[in-house]
Amino acid sequence: MTKAGKHDEWDRMIDVNVKGVLWGIAAVLPVMETQGSGQIINLGSIGALQVVPTGAVYCATKFAVRAISDGLRQETDTIRVTCVNPGVVESELADSITDEPTRGGPWLPTGPLPCSLPTSPAPCAM
């Protein structure tokens, strides 16, 4: 993705994945600070945890969501901040990717995804 020079796609990813999170936080943070409580839930991606070939820019934007969430969590004692990092899911995102190697990247599912649910919320709690 970085070699492809897809500036429009980079701008869109940054606008949605980074600026969208910042604007969302900016919209609710003053109210939450005034009331002394609240919870912000940001949507990251497994891409925030591991970079894949041709996905560097996307992964960077999702790492930014993780960093923004971690930073905000450290700045406040009264507002809960959660960053959910789901794995690969089937969505219309692949249809918007114009770079062929990226569209068929190794992270896209080729069959049913294994799924197991914890028997209690403890394994998922931080």
Image: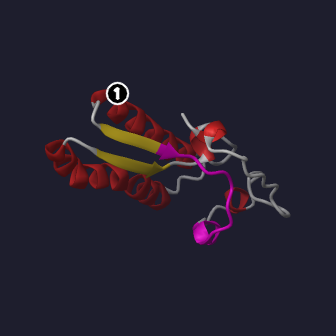
- Residue named by callout 1: 74
| Magenta stretch holds residue 2 | no
Up the image or down, 12 lies above or below 63; here it is below
Q: Magenta stretch?
A: 83-96
User: Viewed as shown, does residue 6 lie left or right of 89?
Assistant: left
Nearer the observer, 123 or 60: 123
Image spot of residue 105 (x, y percent): 74, 55
Q: Residue at x 63, y 72 (%)?
A: 95
Q: Quadrant of residue 115?
A: bottom right
Up the image or down, 71 lies above or below 20; here it is above
Q: Residue at x 45, y 43 (%)?
A: 82
Q: Residue at x 84, y 62 (%)?
A: 110
Q: Quadrant of residue 102?
A: bottom right
What colour-coding does the image apply? secondary structure
Image spot of residue 92 (x, y percent): 61, 72
Type of residue at label 1?
Gln
| Magenta stretch holds residue 92 | yes
Nearer the observer, 45 or 30: 30
Secondary structure type for disc 1:
helix
Image spot of residue 10 (x, y percent): 47, 54
